[in-house]
Amino acid sequence: MVDEKIVSLTNLFMRYPNKQVLNGINLDVYRGQIIGYIGPNGAGKSTTIKIILGLASGYDGEVEIFGKNIASGDDSYKRKIGYVPENADVYDQLTPMEYLTFVGELYGMQRQHAEQKAGQMLEAFELEESAHVRLSSFSKGMRQKVLIISSLLHDPDLVFLDEPLSGLDANSVMIIKELLEKLAERGKTIFYSSHIMDVVEKISHRIVLLADGHIAADGSFEELRKESKEGSLEDIFNQLTGFVGHEERADGIADLITEAAGHEE
Ligand SMILES: Nc1ncnc2c1ncn2[C@@H]1O[C@H](COP(=O)(O)OP(=O)(O)OP(=O)(O)O)[C@@H](O)[C@H]1O
């Protein structure tokens, strides 16, 4: 179906005890879109994702996923969602096969199916030799691949990826970028949150910039570029978040480092 609304946020507000984080977010995301969800540190990106996933409560406003309000009490929508958190805890004492089968079953897959698919996915990510080795011995990038597999194993319709490429080598990055495009072509909707602007620029169909709890920009990279007359997404990001003087600031920090040590000549 064309223009099927997958995520709809209406007047979303969120306050933590010490801080107003979201100040009225309105956002409709459609099937097959790759959304680059960006913003400065602390802007509220993870908070938005956690609210959508039902992991953060106390918000005001409406959140509809697959056309249903998540406050309705029916959380079957969660089975159709995949999530790679920025800081994930994996169960270190498990092997990837055990971990993936466990996660697959949590998402409602039959054990045998989860096992078989996990094996195939591990092979596709060149981890077959480590399939039965404990995760505690895995490198950062190997772990990240397991997390990515765990978010996709149950064939979700909506995927949230928070810095998913962290630790991955250049070959793996290339595969994942291509994979996201292929999944979007097959109707999957992807929220991609990252600070690596050149990747966001390349893979996103639509970029949503969150700043001070508001959506400060929303459009394709070409649209944002026309509006802001800047070259790269990094330049646009800096302009829209009012950031200037990086060289002076770096210089000031370098001064602090080299002066504060108090070396005696
Ligand atoms: N559980 C919490 N309790 C209190 N404050 C929180 C909590 N979680 C997040 N915050 C605050 O809410 C703000 C937004 O945090 P959030 O993690 O959503 O930002 P972000 O845009 O994902 O940032 P980053 O790019 O650094 O990951 C921050 O000021 C953070 O300190």
Image (cartoon, rainbow, N blue to C red):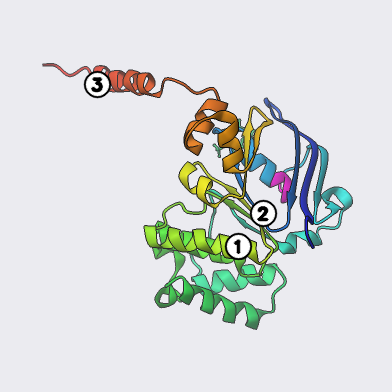
Left or right for 8, reference 81: right
Pair 1/2: label in front: 2
Earlier sequence position, callout 3 versus callout 2: 2
Residue that sits furthest to the right in the current view: 72
Real-space CA distance between mark 1 and mark 2, rounded to the nearest whole angstrom: 18 Å
Span colored in magenta: 50-55
Report which residue position mark 3 lands on. 258
Which amino acid is tagged 1?
Ser
Pair 3/2: label in front: 2
Real-space CA distance between mark 1 and mark 3, rounded to the nearest whole angstrom: 44 Å
Give how far across and how far down residue 215 sits, in percent.
68, 33
User: Residue 254: which numbered mark, if any?
Assistant: none
Task: Give the structural element (helix, strand or loop) at label 3.
Answer: helix
Give how far across and how far down residue 27 sits, in percent.
75, 41
Q: In the figure, 79 relative to 252: above or below?
A: below
User: Observer-nearest residue: 66 or 199?
Assistant: 199
Report which residue position mark 1 lands on. 151
Left or right for 126, reference 220: left
| Residue drawn where x is 51% and y is 69% of the image | 94
Give how far across and how far down residue 87 sits, in percent.
53, 49
Give the number of marks.
3
Say whether residue 196 is visible. Answer: no
Label 1: few (<14), some (14–19) or many (≥20) C-alpha neighbours in 10 Å: many
Determine if the magenta segment contains residue 53.
yes
Determine if the magenta segment contains residue 208.
no
| Residue drawn where x is 66% and y is 70% of the image | 154
User: Observer-nearest residue: 196 or 21?
Assistant: 196
Report which residue position mark 2 lands on. 33
Q: In the figure, 155 relative to 231: above or below?
A: below
Task: Give the structural element (helix, strand or loop) at label 2.
Answer: loop
